Image (tube, rainbow, N blue to C red):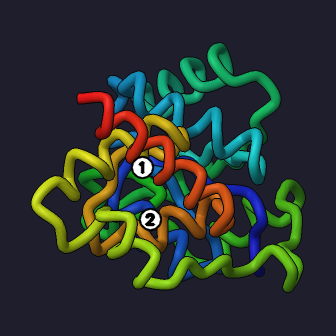
Amino acid sequence: MRIKEIIVVEGKDDTTAIKRAVDADTIETNGSAISKETLMKIQHAQEKRGVIVFTDPDYPGRRIRAIIEEQIPGVKHAFLSKEKTIAKNGKSLGIEHAKDEDIQQALSDIYTPKTDSETHISIPLEVLIEGRLIGHPKAKERRTRLGEFLKIGYTNGKQLQKRLSIFQIHREQLEAAILQLDLEDNKE
């Protein structure tokens, strides 16, 4: 299953389980206190590719769903029962404990298949270097501002190419954003 929408999960272990079961990109909320920046990223993802919220079947998971649904109407939801998310030791539950087939089944009726034209947008590394987004003393500060400008959130240098691809940022959009950063820098 190659999924067009970006799947919102709670943490890294959930991302690992999703990527093990299907071909999809994820956004992690990192707990039930969703930051404003994460909500902006989810909103942007909804506008670009659509979003599927796939959180744990517990109180924090329901709380995350409610916050996202209130702030970003129209997102899709995938669900797994508590029985299908219990850890082998029986002490915790979560998407990260689910079987691949259960994850695939939960997503099967709601996802949009990813087409080949939507797959990978690759920004050459040279563009990132020339834009002073990596390998430059002010690269971190520029990536922070770039993340705000493009509504993709902050990312480190190693993950920047991937984040640009996930949010389907084309080279022209990136170059326009870099030009804006340069104009702001020249004003200082």
User: What's the residue type where badge 2 is placed?
Assistant: Thr
Above-or-below relation of 99 to 44: below
Q: Residue at x 47, y 57 (%)?
A: 95
Tags 1 and 2 touching, CB below 8 Å = yes
Q: Is residue 53 left or right of residue 27?
A: right
> Can residue 168 be seen from the camera position used here?
no
Q: Find residue 128 and report its horizontal and vertical position in percent.
A: 40, 72
Q: Secondary structure at mark 1?
A: strand
Residue furthest toward the front?
186
Please state which amino acid type lies under the numbered disc 1.
Answer: Glu
Looking at the rendering, which quadrant does residue 21 occupy?
bottom right
Q: According to the image, label 1 marks what residue?
A: 28
| 73 versus 57 height, above or below | above
Q: Nearer the viewer, residue 122 or 11?
A: 122
Can the viewer see residue 126 in this picture?
A: yes
Residue 99 % position (x, y) = 54, 75
In depth, the one of 185 and 89 nearer the eye is 185
Gap in Å between the C-alphas at discs 1 and 2? 7 Å
Q: In x, y percent, where is residue 156?
A: 26, 61
Q: Position of residue 119 (x, y in %)?
A: 74, 79
In this rendered view, identify the residue nearer to me: 105 or 70.
70
Which residue is outermost to the left?
137
Q: Quadrant of the N terminus?
A: bottom right
Dot 2 falls on a residue whose secondary structure is helix
Residue position for label 2: 15
Dot 1, how many residues are within 10 Å of its Cα: few (below 14), some (14-19), or many (20+)? some
